[in-house]
Amino acid sequence: MSITRQTRNASYRKLNPLARQAKILEVLGNKEMTSREIATLLGYTDMNAVRPRITELVAMGKIEVCGAVNDPVTGRTVAVYKRVF
């Protein structure tokens, strides 16, 4: 295994992605939110703190895209997510 793969894997494990996924599911509750809204409620300013975990949760079928809205910060259309129960 290459050194970059080793360091990447070590960083991923240290970040505790399962705990962050659980926080995202908790904050979503029964609401519909963008990734920016989720990050803001969790106290993150870096969108990369939640977006990879959201992608994982979508792949697991725990959340899904339910629409799109205009993000006031970027002015771009972004996905809206909701939990799948």
Image: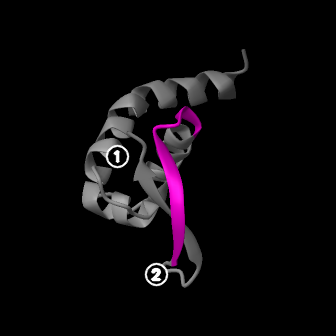
Whether residue 44 appears in magenta in the rendering, the answer is no
> Where is residue 39 drawn, in percent x and y?
36, 58
Label 1 environment density (alpha carbons within 10 Å; few <14, some 14–19, many ≥20): many
Residue extending farthest front: 85
Q: Which residue is mark 2?
A: 73
Type of the residue with mark 1: Ile
Indicate whether residue 60 is drawn in magenta. yes
Q: Residues within 10 Å of mark 2 (few under 14, many from 20)?
A: few
**Location of residue 63 with respect to 42 vertically, above or below:** above
- Classify residue 39 as left or right of residue 56: left
Secondary element at tag 1 = helix
Q: Label the magenta part by its dominant secondary structure.
A: strand
Q: Amino acid at mark 2?
A: Val
Q: Is residue 49 left or right of residue 70?
A: left
The N terminus sits in image quarter: top right
Total residue callouts: 2
Residue 36 appears at what percent x and percent y?
A: 42, 65
Please name the residue shown 35% across and 58% down the image.
38
Q: Which residue is at the front of the view, 36 or 69?
A: 69
Labels 1, 2: front one: 1
| Residue displayed at 36% across by 65% down | 37
Magenta stretch: give its range.
59-69
Residue tagged by mark 1? 24
Earlier residue among tags 1 and 2: 1
Labels 1 & 2 near each other (Cβ < 8 A): no
Give how far apart the Cα atoms at labels 1 and 2 are.
Answer: 21 Å
Q: Between residues 15 and 54, which one lies in front from this camera angle?
A: 54
Q: Residue at x 51, y 60 (%)?
A: 66
